[in-house]
Amino acid sequence: SKTFYGRDFLTLLDYTPNEIDTLIKSALTIKNNQAEYADVLKGQSLGMIFENASTRTRVSFEVGMTQLGGHALFLSPRDMQIGRGEPVKDTANVLSRYVNAIMIRTNSHELVEELAEHASVPVINALTDGYHPCQAMADLLTIHEHKGSLKGLKLAYVGDGNNVAHSLLAAGAKVGMDVSVATPVGYEVNQEIFEKAKTAAEDTGATLIQTNDPKEALQNADVIYTDVWASMGYEQEQDERLKQFSQFQVNSELASLAKADYIFLHCLPAHRGEEVSADVIDGPHSAVYDQAENRLHAQKAILVSLLTNP
Ligand code: CP
Ligand code: NVA
């Protein structure tokens, strides 16, 4: 099979089901044998470009690189020449001469593809409007740990048809987990991405469904997932979205439609009283802090896979 070494990590759709499975197993191994990986990225550096705010992604990537014996640099476009109009191509070429991988968070997925095209080192997508693949890997790891398997489970995503929803569709398609996405009318997932995920799902038999009825999506779900109603870059729509999404709050009434042993996930940051009620996110079904921790382990597996030549 194709090696991970030197590849980009922009969306799970670029990886085979087998490769996603390998990454999950690798994350579990690294999580349970941390000390054995203390030097695997010795002398290697990760450049981290953050156009948007971050708590989990920034800290988990930086700590992950340190735990693997490498180093991470926080790079803000507000202080970089790219923020003053230096071409992406030049930034990609120059950074490739210094660092071993580039991680980037920015709204435009096309910009990240352009960066990856010109960089000679792996580029890791740390959230665009299109996808949040590192989050999806942590989500799969968390579901696997809590449920013991992935294939045949049902995940219900309720809320905005955003980057996180897109990556969950891709993740389900790759591991054979059914994903039902319920959004208000007008806030559906990107149809091109939905079709790509549907095609990928043919390999694993995952059923991917979109609906405007949260109750339909939640029926019999093993996992309930939600995310903010207004993603970064869409804050000015907050008031309108509060109205449009009012029937889409994950609360105990809605959650009662899921399986009795459902787990609740949220990529965080969360807004209690908006997309989720406090009793659900702070209740016994919630696994959101395990999920946040797993960002670290999943990303360490991604870094080791892309940066070591087997
Ligand atoms: N879930 C997530 O990516 O969190 P941050 O925005 O804090 O990195
Ligand atoms: N959908 C959210 C995820 C934040 C981690 C956003 O894009 O802001």
Image: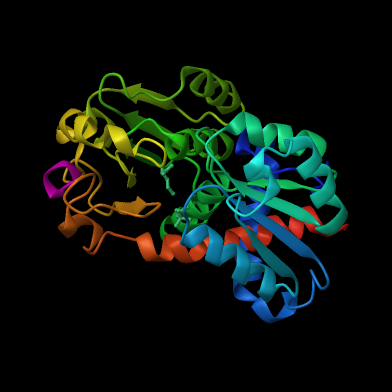
Q: Which x, y percent locates residue 17?
A: 65, 39
Q: Which x, y percent locates residue 106?
A: 56, 42
Image-based side of 181 in relation to 252, left or right: right
Can residue 145 be spotted in the picture? Answer: no
Which image quarter: residue 290?
A: bottom left
Image-based side of 68 in relation to 126, left or right: right
Residue at image x 19%, y 36%? 242
Which image quarter: residue 278?
A: bottom left
Q: How is the image coloured?
A: rainbow
Residue at image x 70%, y 44%? 19
Residue at image x 49%, y 47%? 150
Residue 252 falls inside the magenta stretch? yes
Of the four image quadrants, the one with ligand 2 is top left
141 in relation to 151, above or below:
below
Image-based side of 93 in relation to 245, left or right: right
The stretch of residues the image draws in magenta is 251-255
Give the residue furthest to the bottom. Answer: 35
Can residue 11 be spotted in the picture? Answer: yes
User: What secondary structure predominates along the stretch shown in magenta?
Assistant: helix
Which image quarter: residue 155?
A: top left
